[in-house]
Image (cartoon, helix red, strand yellow):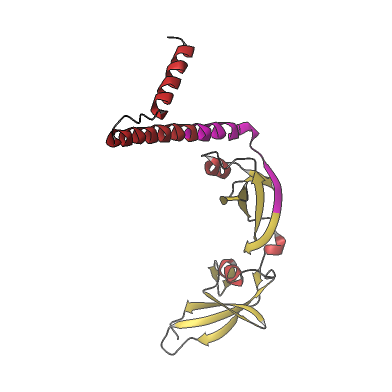
C-alpha cells in the first residue's frame, strides 16, 4: 500500500469518527462521542510530544560550541573568596543543561574553574564560581589577640578575643569571622568559635582549654 493510500484511509477514519448518526439511540451516540474524545486527545498528546522533541533537538548545543560569556566579578563571600557569575550558551530546553553547565570550566586569573552551582534565570543559564585566590580585597585578618580571662570559675575554658580587620562593606561578617584563619598561643584555628559586632567593629572569640580555670 502506498503512502497516499494510507493517508487517504486515515482521513476516512477521521471523518467517520466525526460523523453524527441521528438514527442511533442516545446511548450509542454517547458511545461514539466518547470515542471521538479519546481519539482527539490521543492525537493532541502525540502532537505535543512531537513538538517537545523537535524543540529539544534544535535547542541542543554541540559540546565543542559551549562557551561562557559575560563573566562578571561580584561581592566577597568569605575569607579570600569572591563570587563570579557568567552566562553559558545552553538552552533550558536541553534536559542535560545542569550537567553540562557544572562540567564546563571558565578561566579566571588564568586558571580554569568549575562552577559551584548553576541556575536558570530569565531565559539564561547562569554559572556561579567561587574564586579563592588573587582576591586581595577579600582577605581579612586578625589583630593582636587579647586574653579575656576564664569564662567562669571551674569552667576550664579561657576566652580569647581578636578584632577582625579589612571586612568588606555589606559582607556577611559572620561568614568572614568563621573562615578567617588565626594563630595564637602556639595554636592554629580555621576561624573563630563565635563572633560579635559592635560600633567598634567585628570581634572573634575563642574558648580554649585551660586547666587553671
Residue 43 image offset from top left, x and y in percent: 44, 31
Is 51 left, or right, of 139 in this rendering? left
- Viewer-closest of 102 and 60: 60
**Does 169 sit above or below residue 39?**
below
**Does 134 sit above or below residue 106?**
below
Residue 147 image offset from top left, x and y in percent: 57, 83
Question: Can the viewer see residue 85 in this picture?
Answer: yes
Residue with the most extreme bottom position:
153
Please tell me in which quadrant of the rendered image residue 188 appears: bottom right
- Which corner quadrant holds the N terminus? top left
- Which corner quadrant holds the C terminus? bottom left
- Viewer-closest of 144 and 13: 13
Does the magenta portion include 61? yes
Residue 15 image offset from top left, x and y in percent: 43, 24
Does the magenta portion include 6? no
Residue ID at (65%, 33%): 65
Residue 154 image offset from top left, x and y in percent: 41, 88
- Viewer-closest of 54 and 82: 54
Residue ID at (38%, 30%): 20
Q: How many marks?
A: 0
Residue ID at (46%, 10%): 2
Residue with the most extreme front position:
23
**Does 146 sit above or below residue 100?**
below
Report the span colored magenta: 49-72
- Viewer-closest of 77 and 64: 64
Residue with the most extreme top position:
1
**Does 171 sit above or below residue 209?**
above
Residue ID at (49%, 32%): 47
Question: Can the viewer see residue 109 in this picture?
Answer: no
Amino acid at each position: 500500500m502506498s503512502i497516499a493510500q494510507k493517508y487517504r484511509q486515515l482521513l476516512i477514519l477521521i471523518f467517520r469518527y466525526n460523523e453524527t448518526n441521528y438514527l442511533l439511540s442516545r446511548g450509542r451516540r454517547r458511545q461514539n462521542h466518547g470515542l471521538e474524545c479519546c481519539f482527539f486527545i490521543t492525537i493532541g498528546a502525540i502532537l505535543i510530544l512531537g513538538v517537545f522533541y523537535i524543540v529539544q533537538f534544535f535547542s541542543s548545543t554541540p559540546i565543542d560550541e559551549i562557551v561562557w560569556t559575560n563573566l562578571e566579578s561580584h561581592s566577597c563571600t568569605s575569607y579570600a573568596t569572591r563570587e563570579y557569575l557568567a552566562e553559558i550558551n545552553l538552552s533550558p530546553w536541553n534536559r542535560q543543561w545542569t550537567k553540562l553547565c557544572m562540567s564546563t570550566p571558565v578561566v579566571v586569573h588564568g586558571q580554569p574553574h568549575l562552577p559551584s552551582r548553576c541556575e536558570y534565570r530569565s531565559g539564561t543559564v547562569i554559572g556561579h564560581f567561587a574564586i579563592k585566590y588573587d582576591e586581595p580585597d577579600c582577605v581579612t585578618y586578625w589583630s593582636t589577640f587579647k586574653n579575656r580571662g576564664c569564662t567562669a570559675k571551674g569552667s576550664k575554658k579561657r576566652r580569647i578575643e581578636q578584632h577582625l580587620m579589612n571586612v568588606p562593606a555589606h559582607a556577611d561578617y559572620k561568614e568572614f569571622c568563621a573562615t578567617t584563619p588565626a594563630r595564637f598561643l602556639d595554636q592554629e584555628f580555621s576561624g573563630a568559635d563565635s563572633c560579635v559586632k559592635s560600633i567598634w567593629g567585628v570581634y572573634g572569640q575563642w574558648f580554649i582549654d585551660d586547666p587553671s580555670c
